[in-house]
């Protein structure tokens, strides 16, 4: 079972990098969706939420084309002598960011929307600029949203299968994550190894759901 350690480490690294990237990417998107009065913002919100209902294999297929040798990803990879971003850790990060985007943006949007308009108006009256309002008021008050979004994003990335399989395949040490490893073990009829990973992910998922529910209850009580 020593062969599992690179897979576990790769999965945790992918989930960690994806979560950090989405904190940076998702925060301005969620803030804009929460505070903007543009008529088309719900169309943007629908686009952000699309991975929730889109089959992962569909998203993975189009990402494979986009990041492959004939797509933009091939051109970008060519800048450092590569041929493709698919079947690489970088490609997995891009795919995971897109597939997990709603799991970060939705909790953040809810947290930002919960901030009273009066509080923001006072800050504007005192001369605070938009970026100062976000940094000094929005971010501190939305910490519960960041916590929930980070946990959900990390957990979703750990369990993602369709996108990572389509985009990364099953390359040990490079793209073989835990969900793909289960599929691989089942195909090879190695039931013990498949049971071990599957049970571990069941326990992990239960802990994530429990912690998220407890955090939400505390937030509700605090508000």
Image (cartoon, rainbow, N blue to C red):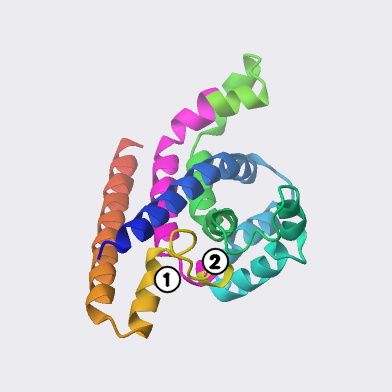
Queried whether the magenta region covers residue 158, the answer comes back as yes
- Asked whether the residues under the numbered discs 1 and 2 touch, taking CB atoms below 8 Å apart as contact, a structural biologist would say yes
Q: Position of residue 160 (x, y in %)?
A: 45, 65
Q: Is residue 69 left or right of residue 58?
A: right
Placement of 143 over or under 128, stated as above or below: below
Residue 14 visible in the snapshot: yes
Q: Position of residue 198 (x, y in %)?
A: 28, 71
Q: Secondary structure at mark 1?
A: helix
Q: Which residues are magenta?
A: 136-164
Q: Secondary structure at mark 2?
A: helix
Q: Residues within 10 Å of mark 1 (few under 14, many from 20)?
A: many
Residue farthest top in this picture: 126
Q: Is residue 189 left or right of residue 172?
A: left
Q: Nearer the viewer, residue 50 or 173?
A: 173
Placement of 217 over or under 65, stated as above or below: above
- Quarter of the picture containing the N terminus is bottom left
Q: Which residue is mark 1?
A: 180
Q: Position of residue 190 (x, y in %)?
A: 28, 81
Q: Answer with mark 1 or mark 2, whichever residue precedes in sequence.
A: 2
Give me the residue at 48% from left, 66% from top: 171
Q: CA distance from mark 1 to mark 2?
A: 10 Å
Q: Nearer the viewer, residue 133 or 102?
A: 102
Placement of 22 over or under 42, stated as above or below: above
Q: Position of residue 165 (x, y in %)?
A: 51, 71
Q: Which residue is mark 2?
A: 168
């Amino acid at each position: 079972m020593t062969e599992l350690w690179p897979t576990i480490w790769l999965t945790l690294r992918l989930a960690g990098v994806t979560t950090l990237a989405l904190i940076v990417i998702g925060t301005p998107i969620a803030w804009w969706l929460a505070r903007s009065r543009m008529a088309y913002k719900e169309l943007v919100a629908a686009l952000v939420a699309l991975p929730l209902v889109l089959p992962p294999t569909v998203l993975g297929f189009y990402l494979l084309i986009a990041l492959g040798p004939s797509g933009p990803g091939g051109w970008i990879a060519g800048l450092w002598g590569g041929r493709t971003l698919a079947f690489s850790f970088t490609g997995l990060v891009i795919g995971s960011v897109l597939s997990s985007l709603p799991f970060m943006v939705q909790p953040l949007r809810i947290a930002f929307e919960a901030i009273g308009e009066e509080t923001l108006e006072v800050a504007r009256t005192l001369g605070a600029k938009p970026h100062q309002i976000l940094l000094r008021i929005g971010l501190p008050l939305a910490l519960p949203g960041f916590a929930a979004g980070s946990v959900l994003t990390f957990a979703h990335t750990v369990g993602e299968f369709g996108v990572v399989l389509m985009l990364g395949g099953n390359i040990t040490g490079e793209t073989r994550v835990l969900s793909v490893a289960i599929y691989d073990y089942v195909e090879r009829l190695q039931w013990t190894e498949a049971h071990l990973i599957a049970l571990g992910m069941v326990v992990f998922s239960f802990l994530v759901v429990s912690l998220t529910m407890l955090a939400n209850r505390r937030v509700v009580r605090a508000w």
